[in-house]
Amino acid sequence: MGKNNKLFGEEKIGKLLLRFSIPIIISFLVSELYNMVDTLFVGRSVGGYGIGGLVLVFPIQRIIIALGVMIAVGTSTAFSRANGQNNFEESRKIIRNGFSLCSLIMLILTAIIYIFSEKVLIALGASERILPYAKEYLDIIIFGSTFLTLTTFISNIMIAVGNNKVSIISTSIGAIVNIILDYILVVEFKMGVKGAAIATVVSQIIGFSYAYYNYVKIKKEYKIPSGFEIDKKIIIPIILVGLSAFIIESEDGFLMAVRNHLLVNTVGDTGIVVLGVISKVYMFLFITMFGIASAMQPIAAFNVGAKNYKRLKTVMQKTTIYAFITSLIMWIGVMIFTPQLISIFVKEQEIIVESVKAFRIIVAALPLVSIYYVSIFYFQALGKARTSIFLSISKQLILTIPISIILVKVFNLGAMGVWLGYPISDILASIGAYILIREEGHELNLKIEKAKTTTKGTIPFPSN
């Protein structure tokens, strides 16, 4: 653990962010490929209603992934902070409790969703034409949820101990297997939605097997005890720190459910199909900013524990700059090539035209959102769970849902009201995040000045 401590405390920040953000970005990219590949094959082989079925299952998938991310982020952040304090015994307990919590929650959730799958889908707005596709898909993919979330957990722990390869390889293996099986089962064997679901579960199990193999080696190296343990004193901080990450991930699913209802009541099943198509491209635009912010989190958490405030400030500044620049580049690219990207998923010209128009509206303010997401991960690293949670719910739940409902129900804008809800909430949430970050920056400057006065005559902290 000492080598890892030197890495987070002394390595040049730009190099460190690059080193850890690339594997996380690739991991996020490959994770999104799971559902995107299913959508691609189903859309071109089954058609729009098949995509509609996958869209209805999406909120459930997102909540499952969100729970895994919550525990993974909470555990890795607590683990990094304990390492920064050189409390290695606490670090071991944190990992053991995190793995136990993740396994328990996923097993219970899988059983509940499988038993009540049809009722859940109807509650999410499934019509008679789309429900059969959605249920067939959900009843199979739910059994891969435990493997998927544990892979996410292990990947985050590996990054926290300085191993940035496992997450890339495990998710890449799963994605490659998923693509191959999707082609075989959906295209060659004509198994439709069922084939896509089977391909997803098998690929998730294989990806998990590789991740767990490496996790066992790490357990031995760092002497992490085996067995099941739930310690309330450890679990509660994990959940509180990871709660904002859960909200970020799950609110997309919750918001998708609300949008499904708004679109069904205004433009029918066609609106759901359009939403399903544009959401696949839309999700990819956040991968770089999420990856850079996620890479920042353990670095920042370590320096919080080590009370290296000058380095912490530099970490935040560079992370914000990198996240904004990369998101701006991606935004320019997708705005130019929107028709080509949309046509990958569907062949129906009417859906392509509507999807292109909707997509360009919803991403209008995308580059500004980078500071919003970076601020959430930054406050997580500081251990300021309340601020992080508030920011997490502000954009989607506090702003987007009410704005969308008002535009659709009050101003009768129909589908356009749903699309306009995206950029309006992006702008407002980004302004709020900037204000909070600026205030936090003032407090950090005071800590830096205080550290200078108390360490006069000693070697200053490295600024990198």
Image: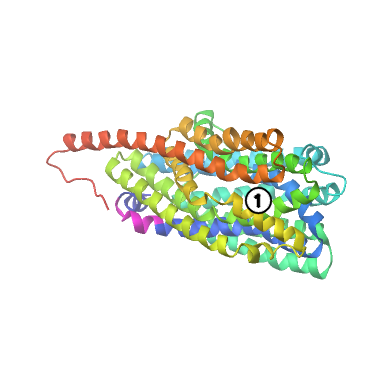
206 is within the stretch colored magenta:
no
Which amino acid is tagged 1? Phe
SS category of the residue bearing label 1: helix
15 is within the stretch colored magenta:
yes
The foreground one among 282 and 31 is 282
User: Where is residue 464 shown, x and y percent of the image?
Assistant: 27, 53
User: Where is residue 195 shown, x and y percent of the image?
Assistant: 79, 60
At x 75% / y 46%, what residue is drawn? Answer: 56
User: Where is residue 438 shown, x and y percent of the image?
Assistant: 36, 37
Say if 56 sits above or below 197 in the image: above
Report the residue that reaches farthest toward the bottom. 188
Report the residue that reaches farthest toward the left. 457
Q: Describe residue 44's horizontal placement relative to residue 235 as left or right.
A: right
Magenta portion: prevailing SS class: helix
Q: Which residues are magenta?
A: 10-17
Q: Describe residue 126's horizontal placement relative to residue 284 as left or right.
A: right
The foreground one among 398 and 413 is 413
- Residue 70 seen in the figure: no
- Residue 423 seen in the figure: yes
At x 36% / y 51%, what residue is drawn? Answer: 318
Report the residue that reaches farthest toward the right. 128
Q: Describe residue 441's horizontal placement relative to residue 189 as left or right.
A: left
The foreground one among 111 and 382 is 382
State the count of labels.
1
User: Where is residue 257 shown, x and y percent of the image?
Assistant: 71, 41
At x 81% / y 39%, what residue is drawn? Answer: 122
Say if 459 sits above or below 287 in the image: above
The quadrant in which residue 179 appears is: bottom right
